[in-house]
C-alpha cells in the first residue's frame, strides 16, 4: 500500500459505467430504434459515446449511421424508450459496497453525470437505498457545459460546500477524468471499456474495478471486509462442459486449467470485472474441489477475447474434457495484471493458489462446499448467475 496522497473530505461519483452498467440497455434500445431506419446497431460507436452529453451522443449516432433526422429529433424519439428499461440496470460490482461504506462513515457523496437530472434520478430509483445516499446530484442539464468542461464538478463541490481540491472523483470515461482534473480534483479512473488503460494517463490512479478501490490511499476510511487477502462476494454460479483452452496451461505454465466455453456467458463476462476469483468446483462424476479462477484477457498472453479459466486445486491422473463442471464463486483476490516475465506470472498464480486454499478452509467460505449446484447435472435445473 502506497502512502496517503492527500486527505480528502468528500467523494463525487459518475453514474453510467462507474456505478451502474447501462451498456446492455443502451444497446437494446438502439437496436430497436435503428431497425426502423434499416440500420443495425453493432456497438462500434460505443467508445465514441462513452461519457458524452445526450446531444453529443445523438450527433455521433446520427452521423455514423446516416440517419434522416436531426440530433434533437433523435433525442425526442429515443429517450422515452429508455424509461421502461432502467429497472433492468444492474449496479456494477463494488458499487453498493462503496456507497454503503462511505455513507456509513459520514463521507459526503455527490453524483455528477452528463445525463439530465431527471434521467439520473430515474436510474438510481431502481437501486435500493441510493436515493438517500447522495448529498446532491448534478446533471448535465444543470450546468452551462457538460464534461469535459469542469462545470459539473465545480457545481458539485459548491453544493457540498467544500473546496474542489478536497474532492475525490471516481470516473469511468476519459472526458470525465479530463473534467475532474480541470477542476483541480483528485481522480481515480475505472475504465469502462476493456484494454483502454493507456488513455487514462491524466488520472491520479487507474483501477480495474470498484472492488480494487482503497479509500485509505486518499485519507478516507478503509474498508474492513477483506479477510486474509480475500474479499467475500455474494456467490455466483456458472457451469458447463470442460473445453480445450489455448494449450498453455499445462505446457507453458505447468498449471492445468479446466476451461469453460464463454458461449452463453456474455452476461457473466460483462457483469464481472477481470480478475482472480476463487470458490468451489463440482465435477459431475468426480466430486467437489477447491478452485481458483481467472476471468479476463490474460495480458501476458494478450488474449483477444475474455476467457473463464478455473484451476481445480487437485492432482488429476487424466484429462476430463467434456465432463460437466459447475462452479460456485465466493470471493475475490486481485485484479488482472500483466507481468514482465513468465516466471513472475507463474509465481503470482501459485501465490493465488495459496491464498484461495487457506481462505476456503474458513467457515465463511467452506459452507458453500455443500451447495447443491455443485452436484447437479446438465439435465437438471441450472442457475447461471445470481
Image: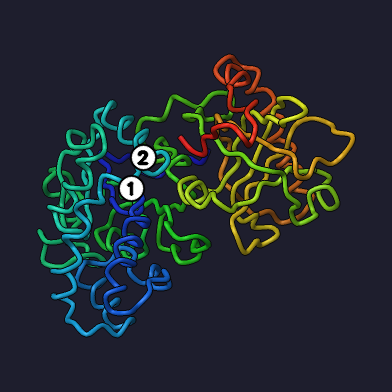
| Above/below status of 24 relative to 382 | below
Please name whichever residue, 22 or 152, is drawn nearer the observer in this view of the structure.
22
Q: Quadrant of the C terminus?
A: top left
Mark 2: give few (<14), some (14-19) or many (20+) Cα within 10 Å. Answer: some
Give coordinates of residue 302: x percent, y percent.
Answer: 66, 62
Q: Is residue 17 above or below residue 106?
A: below
In this rendering, the answer to whether 240 lies above or below 190 is above
Q: Can I make out residue 207 in this image?
A: no
Task: Determine the residue positioned at 31% across, 73% down.
Answer: 35
Relative to 219, does residue 275 appear above or below in the rendering? below
| Residue 161, picture quadrant | top left
Q: Nearer the viewer, residue 80 or 367?
A: 80
Which residue is tagged 2? Answer: 95
Residue depicted at x 36% and y 61%: 173
At 17% from the left and 47% from the top, the residue drawn is 122
Disc 1 crowd, CA 10 A, few/some/many (<14, 14-19, 20+): some
Query: In the rendered image, which residue does mark 1 sit on?
Result: 20
Query: Could you say where residue 63 lies in the image, as x and y percent from the top left?
Result: 29, 83
From the top left corner, tell me how far across and down residue 280 is, in percent: 64, 28
Q: Is residue 372 visible?
A: yes
Q: What is the secondary structure assignment of the residue under circle 1? A: strand
Mark 1 and mark 2 lie on one chain; the one further toward the N terminus is 1
Mark 1–mark 2 distance (CA, rounded to whole Å): 8 Å
Is mark 1 in CB contact (under 8 Å) with mark 2?
yes
Amino acid at each position: 500500500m502506497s502512502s496517503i496522497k492527500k486527505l480528502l473530505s468528500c467523494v463525487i461519483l459518475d453514474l453510467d459505467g462507474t456505478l451502474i452498467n447501462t451498456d446492455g440497455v443502451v444497446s437494446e434500445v438502439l437496436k430497436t430504434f435503428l431497425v426502423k431506419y434499416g440500420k443495425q446497431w453493432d456497438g462500434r460507436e460505443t467508445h465514441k459515446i462513452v461519457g458524452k452529453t445526450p446531444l453529443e451522443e445523438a450527433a455521433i449516432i446520427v452521423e455514423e449511421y446516416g440517419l434522416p433526422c436531426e440530433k434533437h429529433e433523435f433525442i425526442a424519439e429515443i429517450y422515452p424508450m429508455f424509461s421502461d428499461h432502467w429497472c433492468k440496470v444492474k449496479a456494477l460490482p463494488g458499487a453498493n459496497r462503496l456507497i454503503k461504506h462511505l455513507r456509513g462513515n459520514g463521507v459526503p457523496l455527490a453524483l455528477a453525470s452528463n445525463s439530465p437530472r431527471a434521467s439520473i434520478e430515474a436510474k438510481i430509483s431502481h437501486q435500493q437505498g441510493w436515493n438517500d445516499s447522495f448529498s446532491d446530484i448534478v446533471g448535465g442539464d444543470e450546468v452551462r457545459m457538460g464534461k469535459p468542461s469542469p462545470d459539473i464538478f465545480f457545481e458539485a463541490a459548491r453544493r457540498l460546500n467544500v473546496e474542489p481540491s478536497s474532492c475525490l472523483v471516481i470516473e469511468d470515461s476519459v472526458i470525465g477524468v479530463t473534467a475532474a482534473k480541470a477542476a483541480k480534483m483528485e481522480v481515480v479512473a475505472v475504465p469502462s471499456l476493456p484494454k483502454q488503460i493507456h488513455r487514462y494517463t491524466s488520472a491520479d490512479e487507474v483501477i480495474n474495478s470498484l472492488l480494487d478501490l482503497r479509500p485509505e490511499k486518499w485519507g478516507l476510511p478503509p474498508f474492513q471486509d477483506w479477510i486474509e487477502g480475500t474479499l467475500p462476494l455474494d456467490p455466483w454460479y456458472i457451469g458447463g462442459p470442460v473445453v480445450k483452452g489455448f494449450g498453455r496451461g499445462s505446457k507453458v505454465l505447468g498449471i492445468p486449467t479446466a476451461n469453460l466455453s464463454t458461449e452463453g456467458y456474455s452476461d457473466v463476462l460483462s457483469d464481472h470485472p477481470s480478475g482472480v476469483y476463487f470458490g468451489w468446483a463440482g465435477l459431475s462424476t468426480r466430486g467437489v474441489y477447491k478452485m481458483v479462477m481467472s476471468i479476463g484477457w490474460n495480458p501476458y498472453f494478450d488474449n483477444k477475447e475474455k476467457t473463464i479459466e478455473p484451476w481445480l486445486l487437485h492432482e488429476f491422473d487424466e484429462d476430463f474434457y467434456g465432463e460437466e463442471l459447475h462452479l460456485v464463486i465466493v470471493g475475490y483476490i486481485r485484479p488482472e495484471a500483466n507481468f514482465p516475465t513468465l516466471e513472475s506470472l507463474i509465481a503470482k498464480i501459485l501465490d493465488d493458489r495459496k491464498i484461495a486454499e487457506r481462505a476456503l478452509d474458513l467457515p465463511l467460505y467452506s459452507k458453500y462446499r455443500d451447495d447443491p449446484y455443485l452436484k447437479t447435472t446438465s439435465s437438471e435445473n441450472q442457475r447461471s448467475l445470481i
